[in-house]
Amino acid sequence: MSATSHSPTAARRPGLLGRTAVNTVVGIAVLYTLLPVLWLLLAASKNRDALFGSDFFSLADFSLVRNLRDLFAMDGGLYSRWYMNSLLYAVVGAALSALISVACGYAFDKYRFRHKEKVFGLVLAAVMVPQTVLALPLYLMASSAGLVNTFWAVFIPVLFNPFGVYLGRIFSQGYVPDEVVEAARVDGAGELTTYLRVSLRMLGPGLVTVFLFQLTAIWNNFFLPMVMLSDQQLYPVSLGLYQWNSAATTSPEYYPVVITGSLLAVLPLILAFILLQRFWKSGLTAGAVK
């Protein structure tokens, strides 16, 4: 009698039909993601007539450089101001928000205090509250403080992110062993020194992950600036392009600049994910392996 042995690897290998199905699903997902970007690239290179013409997919009438000049010259160069506002809101706000969130998550993980789990339950409950629901209460609070139509009316609310606090606790559990913290305390380090010189370095990948999530949320933030701001000089890119797009119904010359501005608006997020993807990928595996 002879026995046929099969290796576990071969037994787990998917068949041709399974690989085809997986590749098909992945291909559809890639097309769904990239086709709008491809359309945006093509549309940004067209003039107004070609944009609504039948030769949209042709490479003739390449007008990207002209559209860029028109974009930065429209309304006295207002787009440049909007772009800098968005960078200030998003980059500085996301950096401070990540530091605050990770510090709060670290405190929830490493310290014992009264009603800790109940307070953390409130944090988890806040994660489920849509940001649009909070817009009106935030407006009333900003109005009572005299902050409406100021930079701070948009900047201060984005500094506090319940989901970031939740992630901060997860990262602290996965990256900072309790033994390391206890060893630092035995060596005479204070709590602040232990956090800044020991724990925060271990939390680097988690810090970058929270930063990227918050950067995306703040950069795409639209409703809160629309409620808080009336001064065009304080608009972020999202709100400014919305205003131009509304004006394009009566002034068609805004259409090319809106599309070109939208193309430039996605570049910071793409660059951030490309430059920080090494830290982001490692951050997503926090706690997966002991």
Image (spheres, rainbow, N blue to C red):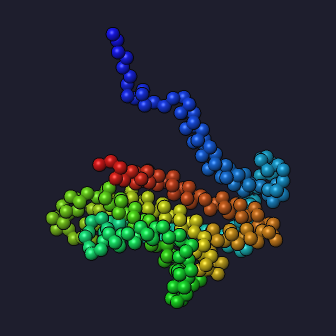
Total labels drawn: 0
Q: Answer with left or right where residue 54 lies relative to residue 183.
A: right
Q: Is residue 165 left or right of residue 139?
A: left
Vertical relation: 47 (above or below) 133: above
Confirm whether residue 87 shows in the render. Answer: no
Residue located farthest toward the top when viewing the structure as drawn = 1
Where residue 16 sits, quadrant-wise, is top right
Q: Nearer the viewer, residue 236 or 4?
A: 4
Query: Would residue 48 be found to the left or right of residue 90 on screen?
Result: right
Image height of 272 relative to 227, above or below: above
Tell me which residue sits at (62%, 50%) in the image.
33
In the shown orientation, is residue 103 left or right of residue 271?
A: left
Q: Which quadrant, please, contains the N terminus?
A: top left
Place of residue 22 in the rendered image (x, y in percent of width and height, measured from the top left): 55, 38
* Residue 44, horizontal then vertical, whole percent: 72, 56
Residue drawn 15% across and 64% down? Answer: 186
Q: Depth check: give the residue in front, 130 or 213.
A: 130
Name the residue at 42% across, 53% down: 284
Q: Position of residue 56 (x, y in %)?
A: 79, 50
Residue placed at 29% from the left, 58% from the top?
176
In the rendered view, tell whether residue 25 sits above or below residue 254. above
Q: Furthest-front residue in view?
A: 1
Residue 144 can be seen, yes or no: yes
Splitting the image into 4 quarters, where does residue 202 fall?
Answer: bottom left
